[in-house]
Each structure stands twice: as structure tokens, then as C-alpha cells.
Image (tube, helix red, strand yellow):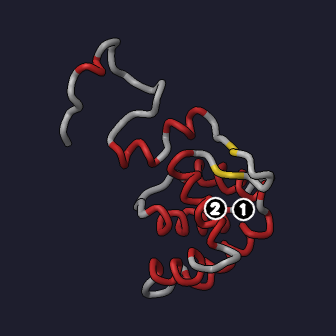
């Protein structure tokens, strides 16, 4: 099922707050939203509704923390949203990992944060691991 634009946009804005990232790919967001909704249909609807009520607030980061992250019913899904953006993986309703595509794994925010490439996604030559990393 294709996600609607309002939900995708809302999911992107919520994800920006949760991940602390100013720019997220809408196509990836649509895929992630669909994957999460397939496992957790009611909680996804609830978290998007909760965010809709606070997205225009003067202090959205504080309100997301207070009304979503710290909420017993919504906090678990907030953690899954963070996990999917950083690793392309989250724990499904069956308590098993739900992995993304290889492209999603490569584009995970984790690699930007730690200043590394994803395993198997290196443009380096054989043996380059012996050289110290380039300082940023």
C-alpha cells in the first residue's frame, strides 16, 4: 500500500526531530514508513496523530520528547523510527529483526555519525585499512 503524502511529510518531520538530522530523503521515508506500518499499523497511526498535534508547537523537540518518546504507548515506536533511520533495521512485532535493502543499509545515518563507510561499501583499494583515517 502506498503511503499518502501528508503521512510521509509528517513522518519526515517527526524523524528529523527524533534523529536530529536536518535533511532526510522523502523516498526513503516513504519506504521506512511503509515497513513500520506493516508491522505496527495502529502505533504508526497513533504516533503520526500525536505528532500532528504538536508539529507546529514553538518547542517541537521538547514536545516530541514529552508526548511521544516518554509516552508508554508511543515511546517504543519512536525508538524503532530512530533505529530504522540509523541502521535500516528495527525489531518487528514478532521480535525478529526487520532489515532493509542494501541501499538503505548503506545510507543509514550511523555511517555519517561515525565517519565511516558501511561494511562492503568501500571505495578504497585493498590494503587501505592500514592507513590512518583522514581527519575531518
Give the structural element (helix, strand or loop) at label 1.
Answer: loop
Instruction: Name the outermost residue toward the top.
Output: 126
Q: Which mark is residue 61?
A: none
Instruction: Name the outermost residue toward the left.
Output: 135
- Local packing at callout 1 (Cα closer than 10 Å; few below 14, some 14-19, many 20+) is few
Q: Is residue 39 left or right of residue 75?
A: right
Residue 39 locus on image (x, y percent) = 78, 55
Q: Residue at x 38, y 45 (%)?
A: 112
- Tell me the residue that label 1 is attached to: 4
Instruction: Name the outermost residue toward the bottom.
Output: 58
Q: Establish if 129 lies above or below 111.
A: above
Q: Establish if 5 lies above or below 132.
A: below
- Local packing at callout 2 (Cα closer than 10 Å; few below 14, some 14-19, many 20+) is many
CA distance separating discs 2 and 1: 6 Å
Residue 55 locus on image (x, y percent) = 54, 79
As rendered, which of 128 and 54 lies closer to the eye?
128
Q: Residue at x 67, y 78 (%)?
A: 72
Residue 49 locus on image (x, y percent) = 69, 78
As rendered, which of 118 and 51 lies closer to the eye?
118
Instruction: Name the outermost residue toward the front.
Output: 95
Residue 126 locus on image (x, y percent) = 34, 12
Are dots 2 and 1 in contact, CB under 8 Å?
Answer: yes
Q: Residue at x 53, y 83 (%)?
A: 66
As rendered, which of 32 and 130 lies closer to the eye?
130
Q: Establish if 43 lies above or below 1.
A: below
Q: Which mark is residue 8?
A: 2
Give the structural element (helix, strand or loop) at label 2.
Answer: helix
Task: Identify the image quadrant of the C terminus.
Answer: top left
Q: How many marks?
A: 2
Amino acid at each position: 500500500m502506498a503511503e499518502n503524502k501528508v503521512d510521509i511529510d509528517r513522518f519526515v518531520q517527526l524523524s528529523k526531530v527524533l534523529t536530529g538530522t536536518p535533511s532526510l530523503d522523502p523516498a526513503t521515508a516513504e519506504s521506512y514508513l511503509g515497513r513500520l506500518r506493516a508491522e505496527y499499523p495502529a502505533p504508526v497511526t497513533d504516533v503520526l496523530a500525536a505528532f500532528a498535534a504538536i508539529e507546529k508547537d514553538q518547542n517541537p523537540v521538547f514536545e516530541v520528547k514529552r508526548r511521544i518518546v516518554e509516552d508508554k504507548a508511543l515511546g517504543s515506536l519512536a525508538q524503532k523510527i530512530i533505529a530504522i533511520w540509523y541502521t535500516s533495521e528495527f525489531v518487528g512485532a514478532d521480535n525478529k529483526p526487520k532489515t532493509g535493502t542494501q541501499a538503505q543499509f548503506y545510507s543509514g545515518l550511523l555511517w555519517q555519525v561515525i565517519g565511516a563507510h558501511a561494511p562492503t561499501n568501500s571505495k578504497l583499494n585493498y590494503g587501505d585499512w592500514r592507513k590512518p583515517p583522514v581527519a575531518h
